[in-house]
């Protein structure tokens, strides 16, 4: 075996070892939380590696009279789905306007630049202002207020993604539709939407996951009846005690919608993200 072949094999082995190490680092927190969800509090605090799995933590989270987790789960689904739908509609319309209507070039660049700047702003800095604005309007502790807040947070990301896809739609198709007498709503529904479907899927999944995981704004704008899953998980950490195992069980249940969504839409997500990167 030549020296160059040996070096290539050693580099390949080293690369795989680094990938395995990276996977362990990424997966370890999930494995730890998953194990904690099936432990008793005493077993977890004692650091037992071998233990008898129990379901009492999941029962406490789902069925205990003092637990609002099921309601919080439904709240997160409602807010996530509504805000994602609103994000996709507004982002698609805005992307079409910026890329296909006769705006000066600086308008589109300014809008996209402002979207980047706004996306960099930490949500916690906006929570207090939104609370002060929503309270006189009666939107504090309401689904509508939280949906509008999450839509605002996720819209810059979706606008950038949809701008890439809308801009790549051939102008000849739009001209042909106009010649056939199609108006803008018809063009959007029959031409634009089918062609940018991968981008819609990718942006929709990301917007839903970001909404599902958002904590600071939800904590500020909601109370017990409208709280979301991240807020519910945080409530297991009280001043005098922390229910680690119940918190772990709630965290394990909280990843189910995101995992299901990723599995169902995986093909469209990969296609949307890779196409957007190439374009």
Image (cartoon, grey):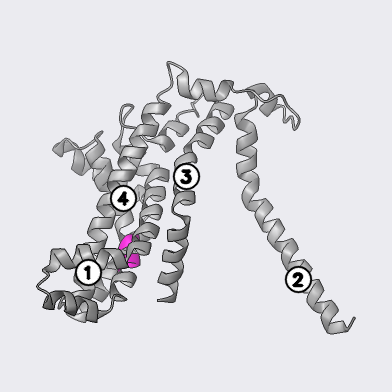
Foreground mark, 3 or 1, reads 3
First in residue order: circle 2 vs circle 1? 2
Which residues fall within the magenta stretch?
157-162
Q: What residue is disc 3 on? A: 260
Q: Residues within 10 Å of mark 1 (few under 14, many from 20)?
A: many
Task: Report which residue position mark 1 lands on.
Answer: 96
When the figure is inspected, residue 171 is found, relative to residue 238, above or below; the finding is below
Please name the residue shown 87% across and 83% down the image.
3
Q: Which class describes the residues within 10 Å of circle 2: few (<14), some (14-19), or many (20+)?
A: few
Name the N-terminal-most of marks 3 and 1. 1
Q: Magenta stretch containing residue 240, yes or no?
A: no
Label 2 to label 3: alpha-carbon separation: 34 Å
Query: In the visual, does 204 lie left or right of 53?
Result: left
**Could you tell me if the residues under marks 3 and 1 are in contact, i.e. CB atoms within 8 Å?**
no
For label 2, the SS is helix
CA–CA distance between discs 3 and 1? 30 Å
Compare marks 4 and 3 and give the one earlier in the sequence. Answer: 4
Give the alpha-carbon distance from disc 2 to disc 1, as whole Å.
46 Å
Mark 4: few/some/many CA within 10 Å (<14, 14-19, 20+): many
Q: Earlier in the sequence, mark 2 or mark 3?
A: 2
Query: Which residue position is annotated with label 2?
Result: 12
Q: Nearer the viewer, residue 227 or 200?
A: 200
Image quadrant in which the N terminus is located: bottom right
Q: Position of residue 218 (x, y in %)?
A: 34, 40
Q: Relative to the observer, which residue lies in front, 154 or 223?
A: 154
| Mark whose residue sits in front, 4 or 3 | 3
Q: Earlier in the sequence, mark 4 or mark 2?
A: 2
Specify whether residue 158 is painted magenta.
yes
**Which residue is disc 4 drawn over?**
84
Whether 269 is drawn above or below 38: the answer is below
Q: Is residue 96 left or right of residue 118?
A: left
Residue at 44%, 76% in the rendered image = 278
């Amino acid at each position: 075996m030549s020296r160059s072949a040996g070096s290539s094999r050693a580099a390949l082995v080293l690369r795989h070892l680094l990938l395995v190490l990276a996977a362990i680092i990424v997966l370890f927190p999930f494995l730890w939380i998953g194990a904690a969800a099936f432990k008793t509090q005493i077993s977890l605090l004692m650091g037992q590696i071998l233990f008898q799995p129990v379901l009492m933590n999941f029962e406490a989270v789902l069925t205990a009279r003092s637990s609002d987790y099921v309601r919080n789960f439904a709240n997160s689904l409602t807010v996530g789905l509504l805000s994602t739908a609103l994000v996709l509609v507004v982002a698609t319309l805005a992307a079409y306007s910026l890329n296909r209507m006769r705006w000066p070039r600086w308008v589109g660049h300014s809008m996209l630049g402002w979207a980047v700047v706004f996306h960099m702003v930490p949500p916690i800095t906006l929570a207090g202002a939104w609370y002060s604005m929503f309270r006189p309007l009666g939107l504090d502790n309401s689904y509508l207020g939280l949906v509008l807040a999450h839509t605002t947070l996720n819209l810059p990301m979706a606008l950038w993604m949809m701008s890439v896809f809308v801009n790549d739609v051939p102008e000849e198709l739009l001209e042909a539709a106009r010649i056939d007498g199609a108006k803008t709503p018809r063009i959007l529904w029959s031409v634009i939407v089918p062609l940018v479907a991968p981008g819609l899927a990718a942006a929709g999944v990301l917007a839903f996951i970001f909404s599902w995981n958002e904590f600071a704004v939800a904590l500020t704008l909601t109370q017990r009846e409208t709280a979301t899953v991240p807020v519910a998980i945080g409530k297991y950490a009280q001043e005098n005690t922390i229910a680690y195992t119940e918190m772990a069980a709630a965290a394990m249940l909280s990843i189910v919608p995101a995992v299901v969504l990723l599995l169902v839409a995986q093909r469209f997500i990969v296609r949307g993200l890779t196409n957007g990167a190439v374009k």
